[in-house]
Image: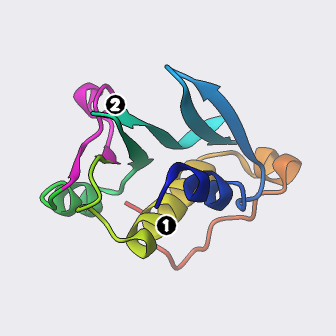
Amino acid sequence: MNRKEFNTFCGTFPAAEHVVQWGNSDVWKAGGKLFAVCGWADGQDAFTFKAGEIAYEVLQERPGVRPAPYLASRGIKWLQQFDDNGLSDAELKEQITLSYQMVTAKLSKKKRAEFGIPDPQPASRQD
């Protein structure tokens, strides 16, 4: 996935907002809450997303994936794909989707309605 494909994908989520900050990083938020970032790592695009407990432990063992700098050091479960050898495009899209769902699930019902964000699916487990 490249930066353009990342931005196009993130823009498909309800109430997704794009800002450029943190040294020209593409930052995506929903309801004012961060769910994905594309920045730089050694001159390459690096994709950062929130992860559930199990995904955080398992995916960081994959080549090209690590705990996200700055976020993970604060005890927050975020991962960064910093190399093309990490996740496939389909896997990365799945993780970004789960990140969006985890972040928006924590918004109040009123806030989700205000932003047009669907209620979380009760059967899905996102930790």
Asked where in the image residue 32 lies, by quadrant, the reply is: top right
Marks 1,2: beta carbons within 8 A = no
Q: Is residue 87 above or below residue 105?
A: below
Q: Is residue 85 above or below residue 106?
A: below
Residue 105 appears anywhere in the view: no
- The kind of residue on which mark 2 rests is Leu
Disc 2: CA contacts within 10 A as few (<14), some (14-19) or many (>=20): some
Is residue 38 covered in magenta? Answer: no
Left or right placement of residue 29 versus residue 25 in this view:
right
* 73 vs 2, nearest the viewer: 2
Q: Can you identify the residue that label 1 sits on?
A: 93
- The kind of residue on which mark 1 rests is Lys
Left or right placement of residue 113 versus residue 13 in this view:
right
Report the magenta residues as a range: 64-80
Which residue appears farthest toward the front when viewing the image? 43
Residue drawn at x 68%, y 31% is 19
Asked where in the image residue 10 lies, by quadrant, the reply is: bottom right
Q: Can you identify the residue that label 2 sits on?
A: 71
Residue drawn at x 31%, y 66% is 87
Is residue 71 covered in magenta? Answer: yes
Residue drawn at x 31%, y 47% is 79
